[in-house]
Image (tube, grey):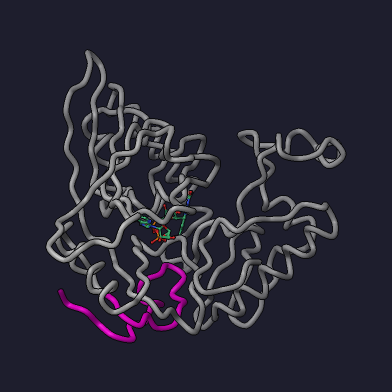
Amino acid sequence: MHLKSNYPISSLTTLQIGGPAKKFVVIKTEDELIEAIQYAEGDNLDFLIIGGGSNLLVSDQGVDKLIIKNGITGISTSKVGFDSFEVKVKSGTLLQDLVNYAIQYGLSGLQKMTGIPGTVGGAVYGNAGAYGQTISDHLVEVTVLNSSAVIPANAGIQLKNLLKEDCGFAYRDSGFKRNHSTIIEVAFQLENGDPKTLQQQADEVLKKRLIKYPKGIKCPGSFFKNIVAETLSKDILDKIPPENIVYDKLPAGKLLEEVGAKGDSLDGIEIASYHANLFVNKGEGSAQAFYDLAKKYTQKVYEKFGITLEPEVQLINLPQL
Ligand SMILES: Cc1cc2nc3c(=O)[nH]c(=O)nc-3n(C[C@H](O)[C@H](O)[C@H](O)COP(=O)(O)OP(=O)(O)OC[C@H]3O[C@@H](n4cnc5c(N)ncnc54)[C@H](O)[C@@H]3O)c2cc1C
């Protein structure tokens, strides 16, 4: 195990922000994961498993934890019905690799998630999705590390399988955000599709995504969650033009735009002039500046609409917004 001390988390996040991790390790196998967790337990350190760091805002002070970067990868498929296949994926596999695999083998249901950075584990944790598809749509089972007990030395890996209905999936949410289980493997059931059609759908999505997220942009994706329309009161809904509701959600970007967020900036963090829910590090931005700018606009949105925006991004070692 190649443990490092005081490792800069900024090098692990797409925002390129974050202070030092007390300890850091990259793991490539389940045995290495166990070894890392046992090390953390022996040293009385909390641990945090991360994937691509594409949904993280980590404080400038860093974290007093062992950060474990998940590099456990692999995909396998078996036929489970006339037209249907089970695809098992290790959680450190890049979501894009899974999407490409599914397209190549003519398996439908993941193609519109092309272009979402990060790993399958990170996607399941946040129930990631785009263009009407989410990672939980065709998910059947998640294998997690049984984290309810301290892992005794030489105990080997203790795994638990959770059916989809036990994973607590909701819009950009899952039970994993609360139970902090470590996701090891994910099984999907996918149906046959025509590879050419799937590729065309993916290409169309990618074209749109490249406009919103040009290559090399330093951001964590959308900062705030959209608002599920059915959770809004009638008073609020009456004020919103129906064309502003997309896939049954009110885009947070619309609300932010209404309170003047587009193009605003603070100490190296800029809100995109073309999308109010896109906060970008222009080079030297800090977590504090990012947080302060986000706080300013949650307050403005609340004052104007009575709606509390929730971050989609995971705030690490930062107070709630
Ligand atoms: C340019 C850009 C575009 C984006 N577009 C989208 C989009 O269209 N839709 C969307 O939903 N998101 C989008 N995102 C956000 C992000 O890519 C997704 O949330 C992604 O699924 C996060 O995966 P990750 O591996 O990077 O997770 P990380 O950022 O590394 O971690 C996120 C959280 O997941 C937890 N986690 C990671 N792996 C595991 C595991 N194995 N077990 C338990 N917990 C784990 C971490 O502890 C952390 O709390 C975008 C981000 C960027 C930078």
Q: Is residue 89 left or right of residue 22?
A: left
The answer to whether 4 is drawn above or below residue 250 in the figure is below
Q: Which contiguous range is marked in magenta?
A: 1-24
Percent across and percent down for residue 208 are 50, 45
Q: Nearer the viewer, residue 223 or 148?
A: 148
Q: Is residue 319 left or right of residue 87?
A: right
The answer to whether 57 is drawn above or below residue 227 in the figure is below
Percent across and percent down for residue 271 are 63, 67
Q: Is residue 103 left or right of residue 167?
A: left
The answer to whether 30 is drawn above or below residue 171 in the figure is below
Q: From this viewpoint, which residue is outermost toward the top?
A: 82
Question: What quarter of the picture does the N terminus occupy?
Answer: bottom left
Percent across and percent down for residue 137 are 43, 32
Q: Nearer the viewer, residue 166 or 263?
A: 166
Q: Quadrant of residue 37?
A: bottom left
Residue 188 included in the magenta stretch of the image: no
Q: Is residue 121 left or right of residue 127?
A: left
Residue 14 included in the magenta stretch of the image: yes
View quadrant of ligand 1: bottom left
Percent across and percent down for residue 166 are 42, 36
Q: Residue at x 69, y 55 (%)?
A: 309
Q: Residue at x 34, y 51 (%)?
A: 121
Q: Residue at x 33, y 49 (%)?
A: 120
The answer to whether 321 is drawn above or below residue 96 in the figure is below
